[in-house]
Amino acid sequence: MKVRMQWRQCSLVAVAAAALWAPFLPVSTAAEPVVPTGSARAAKDDVDWERAKALYQREQQGDRPGGGDRGRRGPVPKAPPATDRTGLVPLDQMAGKDTYKGEDGGLYGGGKNVPPPEHRKAAQRELAKIAPLDSDGKAAGDGKVVLISIGMSNTTNEFSRFKALADRDAAKWSKLVIVDGAQGGQDAERWSTADRPAWGRLQERLRRAGVTVRQVQVAWIKHARMGPARFGEYPKHAEELVGHVRRSLQLARKKFPNLRVAYLSSRIYAGYATTPLNPEPYAYESAFAVRRLILDQVKGNAALNCDAAKGEVKAPLLLWGPYLWADGLTPRKSDGLVWKREDLAGDGTHPSGTSGREKVGRLLLNFCKADANAKGWFGGPSAVVRHR
């Protein structure tokens, strides 16, 4: 009985150690990762016990999470106290005169939430090229337009719900195939190298959906870095994120040669976070990293060139997707969006399996159906005519 009790205590500690370490370790290619729910029971059901024991032993020896990460790192701090609002202003509510740590407002800067005129023209040129393609990437009346997602656990949580909603929506074009390529545990660093397993799993999902890499023309990309506090305060952690996302965009364009447009989104509210995985203000500040990438392309950065007339194409055209952040229980002025505690899972970071995923899924669906730079490929040619 005493031995059994000691093992049970060790087991519970091992579960806790596994929950602490899991976000910082590469995900096995043998199976899809399990997103922690914050429940000890759920963790017990899903944990790899041999791995948990090894992690527990390392913890006892004073080792720190994150040995598999190639990035720079410092100590992993505790999450700040949970709060239902931070007082921060959503980026799309900030006017040009408003500032945050030296940054002005607006999704596209200068208080503007629409692309600059020249970038809008460039977007229209790329969007006009999107058409049904056969498996070899050639135009075909019976071909497909493929939309993929790229990102981490939050991304797949949210995009999988969007896919379920979109596939049932009468407005969705019959030629459009939606494939969730985002994967739990795969943060921006794990998408920034060509040979990382995440890319292979994405290509396998395309194969299972009956489409090819040459039919991929649109992407929704939502990246983050695990434990961003270890990279330093803003702008240091944002610069770290920008570098990895830039490389992932370049790789996406190489792996999917017909990828025309990538819609980028930043994180949802994380004021309820109970772990250092990605709490506030890092979730809020990730929007400035997204904006930096888009504005770098607008300004002609060769590393993100999307126009063959200006040299080698290195990346798809970049646009904002839906902006998902609102300050907890403070309604967002543009649409009244709030994030309640029940919208987040037990860790306060991932969207809950019910209302949280549903909320983002519908925001993404509404964006695809209504945005002038998205409805054409989502609803097909008839959608453009209907909205004229």
Image: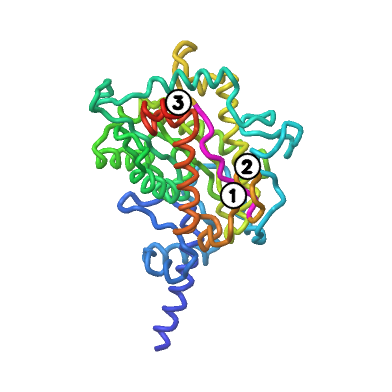
State how far apart marks 3 and 2 are (Cα).
Answer: 28 Å
SS category of the residue bearing label 3: loop
Mark closest to the chain's N terminus, 1 or 3: 3
SS category of the residue bearing label 2: loop
Instruction: Tell me which amino acid carries mark 3.
Output: Pro
Q: Give the residue at mark 2.
A: 334
Circle on res. 337: 1
Residue 37 position within the rendered picture, expressed as x and y whole percent measured from the top left: 47, 62
Front in this rendered view, residue 167 or 134: 167
Is 241 on the left or on the right of 138, as rendered? right
Disc 3 crowd rating (10 Å Cα; few below 14, some 14-19, many 20+) is many
Q: Main secondary structure of the magenta part?
A: loop
Q: Are marks 1 and 3 in contact (CB under 8 Å)?
A: no
Q: Is residue 321 magenta?
A: yes
**Location of residue 256 (image quadrant):** top left
Instruction: Tell me which amino acid carries mark 1.
Output: Leu
Instruction: State which quarter of the image contains the N terminus.
Output: bottom left
Q: Start and end of the magenta stretch?
A: 318-328
Q: Residue at x 48, y 33 (%)?
A: 263
State how far apart marks 2 and 1 are (Cα).
Answer: 8 Å
| Name of the residue lying farthest toward the right | 97
Instruction: Tell me which amino acid carries mark 2.
Output: Ser
| Name of the residue lying farthest toward the bottom | 1
Q: Give the residue at mark 3.
A: 316
Q: Residue at x 23, y 37 (%)?
A: 210
